[in-house]
Amino acid sequence: MITRLMTGAAALAVTAGMAAADYTLTILHTNDFHARFEPISKYDSGCSEDSNAEGKCFGGSARLVTALADARARSNNSILVDGGDQFQGTLFYTYYKGKLAAEMMNKLGYDGMTVGNHEFDDGPEVLRGFMDAVDFPVLMSNADFSGEELLADKLLKSTVIERGGEKIGLIGLTPQDTDELASPGPNVIFTDPSEAVQGEVDKLTEMGVNKIIVLSHSGYGVDQKVAANTTGVDVIVGGHTNTLLSNTSDRAEGPYPTMVGSTAIVSAYAYGKFLGELNVTFNDAGEIVEAAGEPIIMDAAVAEDEATKARIAEAAAPLDEIRNRVVAEAAEAIDGERGSCRAGECTMGNLIADAMLDRVKDQGVQVAIQNGGGIRASIDAGEVTMGEVLTVLPFQNTLSTFQVTGETLVAALENGVSQHEEGAGRFPQVAGMSYAFDASKEAGSRVSDVMVGGEPIDAGELYSVVSNNYVRNGGDGYKMFRDAQNAYDYGPDLADVTAEYLAAKGPFKPYLDGRITMK
């Protein structure tokens, strides 16, 4: 039985001494990289070369190269794995799709990764191209993809690698609602994560594999449920919720590792800001007798590998003209943090929703809805470049206008707050309307006090709405919009709309005005 000892290193050990047959493995891991090949600011958006030289930036592929070399030198037996969502987030992905991610992951020497929901943003075709380009297995256990010919002969549910003379089983997980979050197409059917994992564990165990690691792009909460509902899983490397697990950071959501029974769960935030490093010792039966470690922050103390930095600069050259163009000015920092925009009213949400509504107000549109998960970064004070705007809104979504009843609008808001406790991306930022919600109530009955244009919403009235094409077509659970009347999904790019609104209001002063209240 494993007992957690609350020490500075968060070591986990059994009372018995280590046997001669014990096997030690260092698990190096990343998750939710989101095309952050260049260093990032404290706001997780672009960081200038001047700021980088001043030591104010984090992450970037060039730092990861150095950090991995150092970590591998500390261990004589290591693997490198990824918890999904390498795709999407900057102009690098918009321009190169999965090609640059494949090149950098091969350079870094990954041993395996799971499919994140964003790996499906451009359908199975782009994911297949990425899988053909990488030197390691790509995994996803909780889906039937046998009917998708682009994936059926390449994607794996699990695999076995050898390291230090021992076999290690790797299993992949992706969000069960990926069909709502991305564009996997009709031929990929997602299934329950715990059942899928147990099925693969049983297969691996029959093959004589007794050290099993799940690469899970399912979120910290789901990871804990999978650990509790399965047997035979030793380690879960997490992703999806951008969770920082740590024994030293006051921003951590839990200890590193988080133990659920005998399963160690780890996660290293996002955007390449940390490299996870978990040192695990197994006994001869494949049971963990010790698990300790800590994510390593990729700050200025980690030198950038010059060859990698030069390669990223080369790849950035075609993008520079677009992203370096100054389009506006911010009087103060505009908050687009995940923890803000998926939980309540946030200044970036107000900006984007107001910009959407302003663009189409002459069409009689009354209400704007923007999913909080579509907001990917903050913007700091001062000059605002198009690159910063595109980091906030990287998905190339277009404005969609349509008409729905007040009853449907309330149903949409209920969907938006239905997973509030999970920090889900469906949380609705709004303009032209206000609402209150009580997250302690049962999902589906949380919303109240809905006002449109200062008047209580009328369930039977038809309202004109603007959103983005992802939400209008049912993304993030907004299926009630799929059958909307007079839908037009081909408006201008949301990033362009936001940039132009910022410019017109400059220097833009961010604001909260109480349009969303939590009871």
Image (cartoon, rainbow, N blue to C red):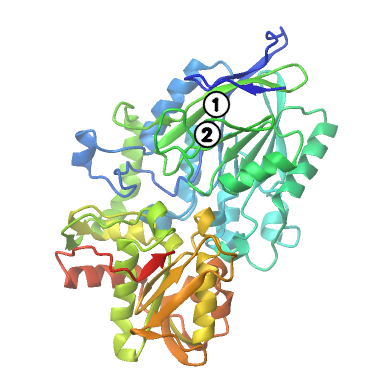
State how far apart marks 2 and 1 are (Cα): 8 Å
As drawn, the label of residue 193 is none
**x 28%, y 68%: residue:** 513
> Is label 2 in contact with label 1 (beta carbons under 8 Å)?
yes
Residue that mark 2 sits on:
29
- Of circles 2 and 1, the one toward us is 1
Circle 2: element type:
strand
Nearer to the camera, 339 or 496:
339
Circle 1: element type:
strand
Residue that mark 1 sits on:
278
Q: Which amino acid does label 1 sit on?
A: Leu
Position of the N terminus, as image quadrant, is top right
Nearer to the camera, 140 or 266:
266
Q: Tell me: 133 left or right of 1.
A: left
Q: Tell me: 497 left or right of 87.
A: left
**359 over 416 or under it: above or below:** below
Nearer to the camera, 223 or 305:
223
Q: Position of residue 199 (x, y in %)?
A: 80, 44
Q: What residue type is labelled 2?
A: His
**x 38%, y 43%: residue:** 37
Q: In which quarter of the image is residue 322?
A: bottom left
